[in-house]
Structure formats: C-alpha cells, structure tokens
Image: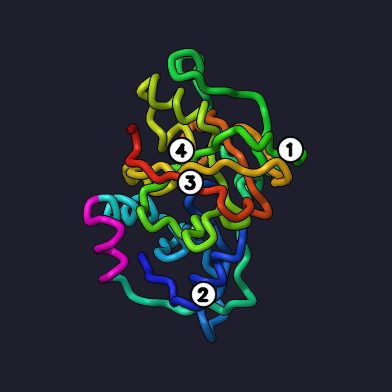
C-alpha cells in the first residue's frame, strides 16, 4: 500500500539518516500494532510497502504524481521508537554495471558506498548537488540555507557528467521511485564541514555507478546557495 506519514513521524524521519539521495528504507511498526513493516519513504512524507506490490505501487505514484498520492493516501502513525533506517550497505543487491555504461556515461565500479568510506574535510570551494524529484526537498534547510544532517548529494562534476553524457539519473544514483528528477540544489560546504565520498551501489534494479557524498552532520549555515531546474 501507499501511505501518507503522520507529521510527527515525518519530522522524526527527517532527523534520521537517509538510505540514499531522497529516500529512506525503514523497518517499523504501526502505532499500537505488533507487526513489523518494511517501507520505502520518499521525502520523509510518502511511504510505500516494500513487498510484492512495490513495483505496482511505484508505477502508481509515477502515473498520478507524488503530490496527488500524498493528498489521497491514507495517513498512518508509526511507533516512533520502532523506526529503524536500513543503510544502503545492508541491502546487498547485485546489479552488474556494464562496460558500455561505464564508458558511455562515465560511471564507476569497484568502490564502496559513501558511508563505508572515511570522513574527509570539504575543500571549501567544491560544489555538491542534491538532485530531487521534489521542489520542497525536506533535506534542504531553507531557513538556515544548509543541507540537513544525514543527507546525500553528488558532486557537481558528476552531475555535469550525467548531463553531458545524457545519462539516466535514476539509474546512475540508484533511486527507488523512478520519478523524473526535476530539481538540482547546489551546496558549497565550508572547509570545516565533513563528508564521506563513494560510489553509488546498486539498488532497486538500478546499476548505480555515480559519485555520492554523505554529510552525516549536514553542512554549515549559508552553504546552500542555488536551486535550478534539472538540466539547466
């Protein structure tokens, strides 16, 4: 099924790390129930059961649109203490990145995901880009103009490679919802901000191979500086 997450639970999810750019895979119980469910949550607000009907429900969201499904889906409450985010490294999905994709689209293989690599300090001059299907991407703190803790992005260079090679960003960054990427949010972390850099690992039948950056503590105030439509 497809659900709208109760606001308090959505805010709790916003304080938890992402599984990948724009989504979380969670294990949780519904309020006052004992059955554990596994769900994919988009933008901390819209949840889809990760079960045998996942692909069907994913297509329904694509066909009707995120906002429409958000407005019409049943609202659910979660047992807050039961929410557990599943990390990308725990998925163990294997999808071969073909040689043609590596060459044609400038993708990478053989390395680890960002959260499995050591932390490094940002240079203070390198730009990162968060790609999103959602104009109101909740990982962008528009009050303090920064990226919130536990969030993913890619490098501006990798984003440019994606565009110049006419690559599919959903496959490159192994995104679960298959919704069209609409927005690019630009962040320039300060030199004391830390990140982990790696290669997007396969997930949801997508090969990955793009570059990802994980900001466990987010970025400093006034580091988010630009929002553009995807491709511009």
The percent position of residue 208, horizontal first and vertical second, equals 51, 32
Residue bearing mark 4: 205
- Residue 80 seen by the camera: yes
Quadrant in the picture for residue 221: bottom right
Camera-side mark, 1 or 3: 3
- Residue 19 seen by the camera: no
Q: CA distance from mark 2 to mark 3?
A: 29 Å
- Tell me which numbered mark, 1 or 4, is placed earlier along the sequence: 1
- Tell me which numbered mark, 2 or 1, is placed earlier along the sequence: 2
In the picture as drawn, the residue positioned furthest to the front comes out as 222
Residue bearing mark 3: 225
Camera-side mark, 2 or 4: 2
Q: CA distance from mark 2 to mark 4?
A: 28 Å
Camera-side mark, 2 or 3: 3
Which mark is on residue 93?
Answer: none
Which mark is on residue 117?
Answer: 1
Which region of the structure is painted magenta? 63-72
**Which quadrant: the N terminus?**
bottom left
Judged from the image, the secondary structure of the residue bearing numbered disc 4 is: loop
Residue bearing mark 2: 9
The answer to whether marks 2 and 4 mark residues whose Cβ atoms lie closer than 8 Å is: no
- Tell me which numbered mark, 2 or 3, is placed earlier along the sequence: 2
């Amino acid at each position: 099924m497809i659900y709208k997450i109760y606001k308090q639970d959505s805010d709790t999810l916003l304080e938890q790390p992402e599984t990948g750019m724009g989504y979380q895979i969670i294990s949780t119980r519904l309020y006052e129930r004992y059955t554990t469910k596994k769900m994919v949550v988009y933008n901390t607000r819209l949840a889809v059961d990760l079960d045998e009907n996942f692909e069907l429900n994913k297509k329904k969201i694509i066909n009707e649109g995120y906002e429409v499904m958000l407005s019409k889906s049943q609202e659910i409450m979660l047992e807050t203490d039961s929410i557990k985010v599943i990390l990308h490294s725990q998925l163990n999905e294997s999808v071969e990145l073909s040689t043609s994709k590596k060459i044609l689209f400038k993708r990478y293989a053989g390395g680890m995901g960002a959260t499995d690599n050591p932390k490094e300090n940002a240079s203070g001059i390198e730009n990162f880009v968060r790609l999103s299907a959602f104009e109101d991407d909740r990982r962008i703190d528009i009050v303090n103009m920064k990226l919130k803790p536990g969030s993913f992005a890619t490098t501006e260079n990798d984003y440019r490679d994606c565009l110049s090679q006419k690559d599919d960003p959903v496959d490159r960054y192994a995104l679960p919802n298959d919704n069209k990427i609409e927005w690019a949010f630009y962040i320039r972390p300060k030199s004391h901000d830390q990140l982990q850099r790696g290669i997007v690992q396969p997930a949801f039948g997508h090969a990955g191979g793009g570059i990802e950056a994980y900001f466990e503590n987010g970025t400093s105030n006034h580091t988010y500086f630009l929002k553009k439509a995807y491709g511009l």
